[in-house]
Every structure is written in structure tokens, then in C-alpha cells.
């Protein structure tokens, strides 16, 4: 694994931890997620950033770790970045 991949994976883990923190703060409650834009924005920005980071993972690591849906994470990033105002909260929650 390349040094760059290690750095990127640590950043991804940091964003995952931030999502966990936001969910804990709001009692991991879907109804609160639906009604609270701060909760939505905190989680969705992290998901967007994870997708962005997945785009820079080396081909070597992508091939080694085929169980990770790298391409799908990049696709999620596109949806969260470019179609955020039309985002399906249930699908977003499922991702989170």
C-alpha cells in the first residue's frame, strides 16, 4: 500500500468517526435526521468527502481491496455534491 493511500484511508476513517459522532449526538434517530438540517448537513458532508477521497485511492489498493465498492462511493459523492437539494433522505440515511 502506498503512503498516500494510508493518509487517505486515515482521512476516510476520520470522516466515518464524525458521522458516528453526529449520529450519537442525535441519538441515531432517523426522525430527527429528517427534521434537522444540521444533522443532515453534518452527515452528508462527511459522506461527500469520503466519496471524494475514494477517487484518489490508488489503483493498486482498489485491486487489493475489491470488497470495497470504490466506484459506488465515488458515485455517492456525485449525488451528494450535485443533487443535494433533491437528495432522498431515506437513501442518505441508509448510506449513513
Image (cartoon, grey):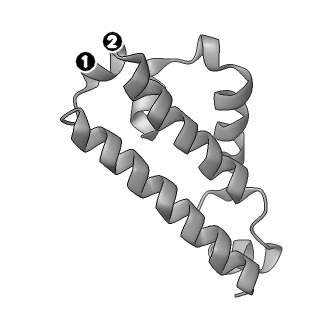
Residue density around tag 1, few if under 14, some if 14–19, many if 20 or more, within 10 Å? few
Residue at image point 63% right, 20% down: 84
Residue 10, placed above or below residue 29: below
Q: Position of residue 64 (x, y in %)?
A: 67, 81
- Foreground residue, 29 or 60? 29
The answer to whether residue 67 is visible is no
Residue at image point 59% right, 70% down: 9
Residue 17, placed above or below residue 62: above
For mark 1, give the secondary structure: helix
- CA–CA distance between discs 2 and 1? 6 Å
- Foreground residue, 91 or 44? 44
For mark 2, give the secondary structure: helix
Residue 31 marker:
1
Q: Position of residue 81 (x, y in %)?
A: 70, 29
Name the image quarter holding residue 30: top left
Residue density around tag 2, few if under 14, some if 14–19, many if 20 or more, within 10 Å? few
User: Horizontally, is 23 left or right of 14 in the view?
Assistant: left
The residue beneath circle 2 is 35
Q: Position of residue 42 (x, y in %)?
A: 46, 34
The quadrant the N terminus occupies is bottom right
Residue at image point 71% right, 49% down: 52
Name the image quarter holding residue 87: top right
The quadrant the C terminus occupies is top left
Residue 6 marker:
none
Residue at image point 56% right, 61% down: 12
Q: Position of residue 62 (x, y in %)?
A: 72, 71
The answer to whether residue 23 is visible is yes
- Whether pointer 2 and pointer 1 mark residues with C-beta atoms closer than 8 Å, the reply is yes
Q: Nearer the viewer, mark 2 or mark 1?
A: 2
Amino acid at each position: 500500500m502506498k503512503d498516500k493511500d494510508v493518509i487517505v484511508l486515515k482521512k476516510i476513517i476520520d470522516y466515518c468517526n464524525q458521522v458516528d459522532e453526529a449520529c450519537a449526538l442525535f441519538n441515531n434517530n432517523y426522525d430527527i435526521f429528517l427534521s434537522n438540517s444540521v444533522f443532515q448537513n453534518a452527515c452528508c458532508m462527511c459522506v461527500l468527502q469520503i466519496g471524494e477521497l475514494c477517487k484518489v485511492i490508488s489503483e493498486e489498493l482498489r485491486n487489493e481491496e475489491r470488497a470495497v465498492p470504490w466506484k459506488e462511493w465515488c458515485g455517492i459523492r456525485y449525488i451528494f455534491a450535485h443533487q443535494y437539494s433533491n437528495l432522498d433522505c431515506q437513501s442518505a440515511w441508509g448510506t449513513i
